[in-house]
Image: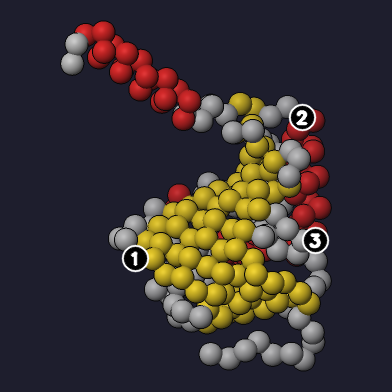
Amino acid sequence: MRLPAAVAAVALLAAVACRTVEPAPVPADPALTVGALSTVLAARDEAWGPRRFKALYRGEVASNAGFTVRGYLALFWDGEKLSWRASVPLAGSPRSGTVRRSGGEAGELFPGRLAAVDLLAVLLGIPEEIPSGEGALVRGGRIELRLPSGDGRAVLVSTPGGVTGLLLPGGVRVEFSPGAGVPRRIELKSPEGRALLTLESYGGWPEGEEAPKE
């Protein structure tokens, strides 16, 4: 390669690299922080308040080993526990399980093992834990609010747009398309792979109606 061509190629690569690198985070000003906290509190009250619902997602789980599994995930939430049923085993998990608001093990529903509180935050679209405004950052056009429980947990808030992402322990990152009741779309990425859920249906879950058995 001639020298002028080599220089041009290096310049092009540098320009591409500059365009793809996310800008460095900067401290959020107080007004942005207060607005983001208000958004989170409103969404939290809606998601975690007394309600019963059932939802059906179309799901795809891909491991870094190259395996991809597609199926459906049904959710049943009574305000204290979430029962789930999958048409096929996802991420090597069983085809059904229960996750309790009080905590405990959550199972391997997604690539990477999540605590129960984190799995509920993913499926409800927001953690029950209230974030702190201390150390709030503007990162990639969103406000990052850290959660007091630590381990890298944070809520990502778009202005406008609502809660559109989560940062969770173990390098897990979640992106949401918010919706009424539950997220319309959930994309989770972890060091073990990725999962994508797309909402098919959502509605109330009447008292006395049991979740389907396997």
Task: Classify mark 3: helix, strand or loop.
Answer: helix
* Left/right of residue 175 with respect to residue 89 in the rendered view: right
Task: Name the residue carrying label 1.
Answer: 67
* Separation of marks 2 and 1 at Cα, in angstroms: 45 Å
Q: What residue type is labelled 3?
A: Glu
Q: Disc 3 versus disc 2: distance between alpha carbons?
A: 25 Å
- Which residue, given by chain and number where applicable, does mark 3 sit on? 46
Left or right of 188? Residue 135 is right
Residue at image location 70% in from the left, 41% down from the top: 158
Question: Which one is earlier in the sequence, the residue at label 2 or at label 1?
Answer: 2
Say which quadrant the N terminus sits in: top left
Q: Residue at (80%, 66%) from the top-left corner?
A: 49
Q: Position of residue 189 (x, y in %)?
A: 47, 53
* Nearest to N terminus: mark 3 or mark 2: 2
Residue 201: image x %, image y %? 69, 72
Q: Give the residue pinned by disc 2.
A: 30
Q: From the top left corner, tell me how far across and down residue 185 is, in percent.
A: 62, 58
| CA neighbours of label 3 inside 10 A, class few (<14), some (14 to 19), many (20+) | some
Measure how far apart labels 3 and 1 are at the Cα level: 36 Å
Q: Which residue is drawn at 77% across and 29% down?
A: 30
